[in-house]
Amino acid sequence: MKLEKVDQKNLELAYHIQKTIFPEEPDFLFIRRSVNSDRIEFNHYIAYVDDRPVGITGTYTEKCDKDSIWLSWFGVLPNERRKGYGKEMLLETIEICKKLPFKYFRCYTSIEENASAQPLYKSIFDICEKYLNRNDKTPNDTIYSMSLTDEKVPYWNNKYIGIKEYDALSQKGEEYLKHHKKSIL
Ligand SMILES: CC(C)(COP(=O)(O)OP(=O)(O)OC[C@H]1O[C@@H](n2cnc3c(N)ncnc32)[C@H](O)[C@@H]1OP(=O)(O)O)[C@@H](O)C(=O)NCCC(=O)NCCS
């Protein structure tokens, strides 16, 4: 497996892969934001096997915590699942994170919407907790965390993430594409 960083050239492919895997949450603007950002921790990657794109992964951070790096859009195309690619992609993403100056790797997920990922996350991450924050959108939301060093990872402890804002950006992205598709893709 080879991870190729998403840039201006493969942005359209990355968006199509992400939208195929997450049809309810297409996220063009977030992926494009990572392409235009020079933050070393904010990137997406297309996973290739034998020159065939099989999935997407990525990393980002939350402003409120400088010690944690998060798993961004992570998924394998439907016809490529159950071949070990998801696990390989996650382990490669963790290797990328270990080279960056962060102590903890975290993942926000929904036990219902992302049910297929839960056994994998349980097998790789150190701890799992419910995310409950009354100012945010949190039904069935879960956070997995692991340490990238020898230090024990602390619980996230319901610090505000802003899932509402991420959802709004996803909707805004589809609106944006309706009006600009020809000029940007
Ligand atoms: C989660 C996902 C990435 C797994 O990818 P994959 O390539 O099928 O996973 P792998 O073949 O590497 O399997 C990894 C482990 O997960 C298990 N697994 C995979 N799909 C599963 C499923 N649908 N139900 C239960 N377990 C599953 C495998 O049995 C394997 O366990 P093992 O290592 O003990 O054998 C893929 O199902 C997917 O893209 N789901 C939709 C997107 C999504 O929800 N992403 C998570 C966002 S938070």
Image (cartoon, rainbow, N blue to C red):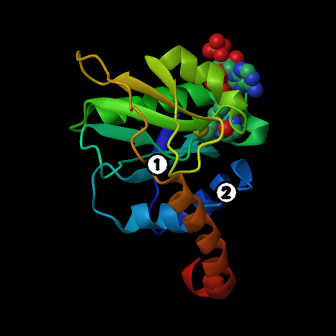
Q: In the current view of this chain or complex, which residue is farthest to the front?
A: 134
Say which residue appears at 67% left-offset and 57% top-offset.
25
Q: Is residue 84 visible?
A: no
Say which residue appears at 72% left-offset and 39% top-offset.
113
Label 1 neighbourhood size at 10 Å, few (<14), some (14-19), many (20+)? some
Depth check, front residue: 131 or 55: 131
Say which residue appears at 61% left-offset and 86% top-offset.
180
Would you place residue 162 above or below residue 52 in this image? Answer: below
Give the number of the disc on residue 25: 2
Nearer-N-terminus badge (1/2)? 1
Looking at the image, how many numbered discs can be counted on the residues?
A: 2
Give the number of the disc on residue 4: 1
- Ligand 1 resides in the quarter of the picture at top right
Depth check, front residue: 35 or 128: 128
Q: Position of residue 124 (x, y in %)?
A: 49, 18
Say which residue appears at 39% left-offset and 23% top-offset.
146
